[in-house]
Structure formats: structure tokens, C-alpha cells
Image (cartoon, coloured by chain):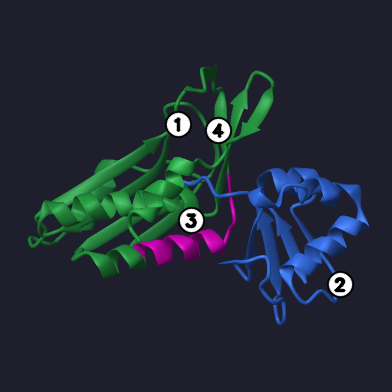
Amino acid sequence: MQIRYFAWLRERVGTPVEEVETSATTVAALIEELRKRDERYAYAFEDMSAVRVAIDQELSEMDAPLSGAREVAFFPPMTGG
Amino acid sequence: MSVSVQQGDFDVAAEMAALRAGRTDIGAIVSFTGLVRDSAHGEEISDMELEHYPGMTEKALQDIEAKANARWPLQATRIVHRFGRLSPGEQIVLVLTASPHRHAAFEAAEFLMDFLKSRAPFWKKEGTGDGGRWVDARDSDEDALSRWE
């Protein structure tokens, strides 16, 4: 599965995109896996009220299932316009 | 309906002319242009970096545009959103709405901007003296959105 990071999440994790092998069944479980992997992820995901997720480019929820997902993206609240 | 996500600048007059080219049924066009300001929170801004999510951005803008067209009797809409590094005074975003009467055009333009603010995957980083600062989403932007629900 491909994971993308944007804005300060990208800066904290240190990469815009990475390929990850995971058995996580939900977004929340995936974040837990990442957190345990390295301090960079723990730092990126320290305040979950400021993290949004998209699954295959559709805005989604943290408890959403990951089955069949090809691309998961994490980013802060959007500031367009 | 038409959406562009681009690095380059846009020409408001040319966009408006294209929107109404060859038609005489349009009664009103509302145009909104968002610009980079030179200060925020009393601090000088040297530039603004606009990051976006290629692919999702286009889909999100098309979805927002379709929502507006489903809600108001619009004859044409156009959204142009830039990304990359922009300087104070530069244009960031253009929204055009055309309808037979002005009310629909005014309301739809506000609706589109309210959705762009917090539902289009863009992130702004303001260049300041101490490096840069990611712009926080504002509660007032969420409030602006909730009035359309």
C-alpha cells in the first residue's frame, strides 16, 4: 500500500510517499503500526485532532476499513481558497 | 463546468470572456479572486507555498463544482486554483459563476469558496522571518461551511 503525507505531516515523517506492507484492517490500526515503527511517526501523529485521512483520494474516517485500499494519505486540515 | 489546477497565473478578463463566448442567455456573472496578502497576524509574509494533492485536488474541485450546479440554476462555472510558490499580491484562486439572475450567481460563488477553503486538498505555508509557518485551518471556515448544510 502506498502512503502519502502532506504539509507538516510530510515534514515530520520526512518523506512525501512510501510503500508499506501492512496487515492493519483500519486507518487507526495502520497509524498504531507506524507509531511503533519510529519516533518520526509518533511525532507526526501526536495530535490526532489535527490529522485528516483520505483513502484512494476520498476523504475518510480514522475507523474506516483499509480492505482493498491502494493509497492512503495523511494531512492536516485543508486550507484552500 | 470547468476546473484547472495550475502553477501559472490566470487572466480574469480572458476567463470571463471564455465563459460567455457565443451565448446571450447569461444575465449575471460573479467573479471572485483570492490574493496572497503581505501580512498575517501582524507579521510580514515574504511568500506563500501552496502544496496540494495531485489527483485528489482535481476530483475535489469537480465534486464541489457539481454540488453548486445541483443546488443553483447556474449556466456556467469555472474554478482555477494555483499551487507552488506565490508572492504577495499574486492571484491564488478564481471562481466564476454565471446564471440568468444575480442571486444564484452570488450565492453559488460564496458556496464554492466556502467549500474550497476547507474541502479542497491544499495547504498553505507562509514564508516569515523565522523560516515558515503552516497556515492553520480556522474554525470560522468550518462555520462558513456549516451554513450550507
Q: What is the x, y in percent for residue A5?
A: 71, 54
Nearest to the observer: residue A6 or residue B78 = A6
Q: CA distance from mark 4 to mark 3?
A: 19 Å
Find the residue positioned furthest to the bottom: A68
Q: Mark 2 — residue? A: A21
Secondary element at tag 3: helix
Residue B36's label in the rendered image is 1
Q: What is the x, y in percent for residue B5?
A: 47, 53
Q: Earlier in the sequence, mark 3 or mark 1?
A: 1
Q: What is the x, y in percent for residue B139?
A: 48, 43
Nearest to the observer: residue B132 or residue B6 = B132
Mark 1 and mark 4 residues within 8 Å of each other at the beta carbon = yes
Instruction: Kindly report which numbered mark, 4 or 3, lies closer to the viewer in this rendering.
Output: 3
Magenta-highlighted stretch: main secondary structure? helix
Provide the residue span drawn in magenta. B51-65
Q: Mark 4 — residue? A: B48
Q: Chain of mark 4?
A: B
Locate residue B106 relative to residue B144 in the image: left or right.
left
Label 2 crowding class (10 Å Cα cut-off): few <14, some 14-19, many 20+?
few
Q: Amino acid at mark 3?
A: Arg
